[in-house]
Amino acid sequence: MNEQKCTAPILLRLAQEKDLPDICAIFNEVIASGNTIYQTHLYTLAEIKNWFSSKCERGYPVIVAERENQVLGFGSYDAFRARESYKTTAELAVHLYKQYRGQGVGTKIILDLLTRAQAQGIHVMVSCIDSANTGSIRLHERLGFQHVGRMPEVARKNDQWLDLVIMQRTTRSK
C-alpha cells in the first residue's frame, strides 16, 4: 500500500497581535529578497504594531493563513486613494513566506479578502504588482483581475528601474 502525505488544511482567520512577529518577518523577507515591495527599509516590530493598529482602527482586515498553528502568509487591503469618491475601491496586498508560495495559499487569502471587501461595500479591488513578478500576475489573472495599466520606471530599487503593473477586478463573484 502506498503511503500518501497528508497535510493539514490551511485555515484563514483575522490576524491577532500574536501574529505580528510573523507578519514582520514575512514583510522583511519579501523586502530583502527582491522587488515585490518597492521599499528598502526593513520594518521593526513596533512599526508593524502601528500598521496593524491603524488597519484595525480604520476597519480594514488583516488575514493570516496558517497550517498547524504555523503562519504561512497574510493579506490585507486598504484605501486605494484618500479622496471620498474612491471609498468603494481598495488596494490588495498578499505576502507569503517563500516556502509557501505556489501552493494555493495566496489564492485562498485573495478570495477571502474579496468576500470581506464586498461585505464592506468595496466594489473594486486593485492590485499593484512588479512587472517581473509573473507568478503574482498569473495568479491575479486566474482570479479574474484584468490588466488596467502599466507604469514604466515608476520606482527604483536594487539599482534598477521598476515597472508597476496595475490590475483590478470587482469584488462580486466572477
Image (cartoon, grey):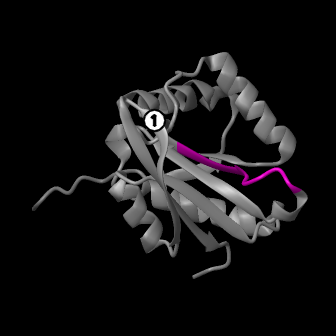
Quadrant of the snapshot with the C terminus: bottom right
* Residue 67 in view (yes/no): no
- Residue placed most toward the observer, 67 or 60: 60
The residue under label 1 is 156
- Residue placed most toward the observer, 122 or 126: 126
In the image, residue 79 lies at what x, y percent? 76, 52
In the image, residue 14 lies at what x, y percent? 68, 46
In the image, residue 56 lies at what x, y percent? 80, 40
Magenta span:
74-83
| Secondary structure of the residue carrying numbered label 1 | strand
* Residue 82 in view (yes/no): yes
In the image, residue 66 lies at what x, y percent? 50, 44
Image-based side of 151 in relation to 1, left or right: right
In the rendered view, tell whether residue 139 sits above or below residue 72.
Answer: below
Q: Is residue 35 magenta?
A: no
Residue 16 occupies quadrant: top right
